[in-house]
Amino acid sequence: MSAPTVPSPILAPPHVLSLLLRLHALSITQENMLDRDMFRLDPKISRTQNFRDIMRDKFIALEQDKCHFVYQLCLAINAKNIVEAGTSFGVSTMYLALAIGRNLEATGGKGVIIATENEASKAEKAREHWKEAGEIVTKYVELREGDLRETLKADLPEIDLLLLDIWAPMALPTLKLVQPRMKKGAVVIVDNTIGSALAYKDLLAYLRDPESGFTNLTLPYSNGLEMSVYMPMK
Ligand SMILES: C[S@@+](CC[C@H](N)C(=O)[O-])C[C@H]1O[C@@H](n2cnc3c(N)ncnc32)[C@H](O)[C@@H]1O
C-alpha cells in the first residue's frame, strides 16, 4: 500500500507548479549558506549597505508550507486585493496571484496583487519568473518598484490581505500606510514573528495593543507566522 500523499491546495498548470518547486529549492539552498543570526539579533542590520549587497541576489522566499497556507487563506476570505510587502524574486507573489485568479473565477469582480520591491535587479528577475508562469500570474500582478514607504502612499484599493515578508524595520511603517485602506476582516500575515521577535518588537507591540483593532494569533510554522485580523470596534 502506498503512503497517503499530502494534499496541496494549489491549482495551477504543471509548468507553474514545477517553477514554484524549482524556486523554493533555490531559495532553500541559498538560505542554508546564510548566517540567519544576521536577521534575528540586530534589528538595525537591514539598514546597512553591506546587508543590501549580501541580499541582492538572495530569494529569502516564503517557505512552501507557508505559501500554501496563505493561498488557502486567500481562498477562504475571497481575497481579491492584496499588498505584498517584499517581493524579491516573486515567489510568494505567484501564489497570491493564483489565489486571486481563482477567487475572481468563482465570484467575479476585479482583483490585484500589489507587489513591492526596491532592488531593481530583483524586480527584473521577478518579472522573468512571472512571465515564465504566464498570464495566469501576470494578469493580476502590479509591481511597484522603489521604496514601499513611497510606492504604497497612494492608489491602494480596499485591501483584503497584507503579507509582510520584509526586513523587520519596514514592517510597521508599511502596516501604518496600508491600514487605512484595509477592510474590516482584512488579514495581516507576518513571517518569522517568533524567530525575529526582537526585530519585530515595535510591530508586535502595535498589533497586540488591546486598542489596536487587531486580533492576533501566532501560527506554529517554522520561526512563527503571525496571523492578525483587522476588526476595529467602529
Ligand atoms: C524576505 S524578501 C521577500 C520574499 C518574497 N516575499 C518571496 O516569498 O519570494 C524581502 C524583500 O523586501 C525587499 N525590501 C526591503 N526593504 C524594502 C523597501 N523599503 N521597499 C521595497 N522593498 C523592500 C528586499 O529587497 C527583499 O527582496
Image (tube, rainbow, N blue to C red):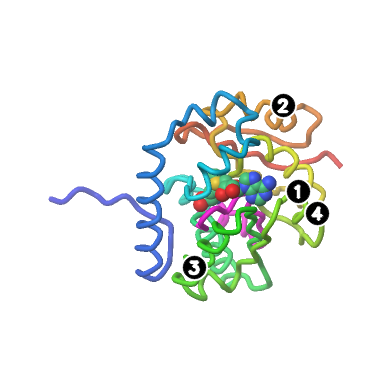
What element does badge 2 sit on? helix
Q: CA distance from mark 3 to mark 4?
A: 26 Å
Label 2: how many residues lie within 10 Å, few (<14), some (14-19) or many (20+)? Answer: few
The answer to whether 10 is drawn above or below residue 28 in the figure is below
Residue where numbered disc 1 is placed: 149
Q: Select label 2 or label 3 by which is in front.
A: 3
Based on the picture, tell me whether residue 233 belongs to the magenta stretch: no
From the viewer's perspective, tell me whether residue 74 is left or right of residue 1: right
Mark carried by residue 153:
4
What element does badge 3 sit on? helix
Going by the numbered disc 3, the residue's amino acid type is Glu
Determine if residue 162 is in view.
no
Residue in the foreground of this view, choosing between 89 and 13: 89
Mark carried by residue 128:
3
Label 1: how many residues lie within 10 Å, few (<14), some (14-19) or many (20+)? Answer: some
Q: Report whether the residue tagged 1 is closer than 8 Å to ligand 1.
A: yes
Going by the numbered disc 1, the residue's amino acid type is Arg
Going by the numbered disc 4, the residue's amino acid type is Lys
Based on the picture, tell me whether residue 80 belongs to the magenta stretch: yes
Label 3 near label 2: C-beta < 8 Å? no
Residue where numbered disc 2 is placed: 205
The answer to whether 131 is drawn above or below residue 9 in the figure is below
Q: Position of residue 50 (x, y in %)?
A: 57, 37
Going by the numbered disc 2, the residue's amino acid type is Ala
Residue drawn where x is 59% and y is 36% of the image: 226
Sequence order check, earlier mark of 1 and 2: 1
Q: CA distance from mark 2 to mark 3?
A: 38 Å
Q: CA distance from mark 4 to mark 2?
A: 23 Å
The answer to whether 193 is drawn above or below residue 114 in the figure is above
Please tell me how many numbered marks the rendered image carries.
Answer: 4
Q: Please provide the residue range marked out in magenta.
A: 71-90
Sequence order check, earlier mark of 4 and 2: 4
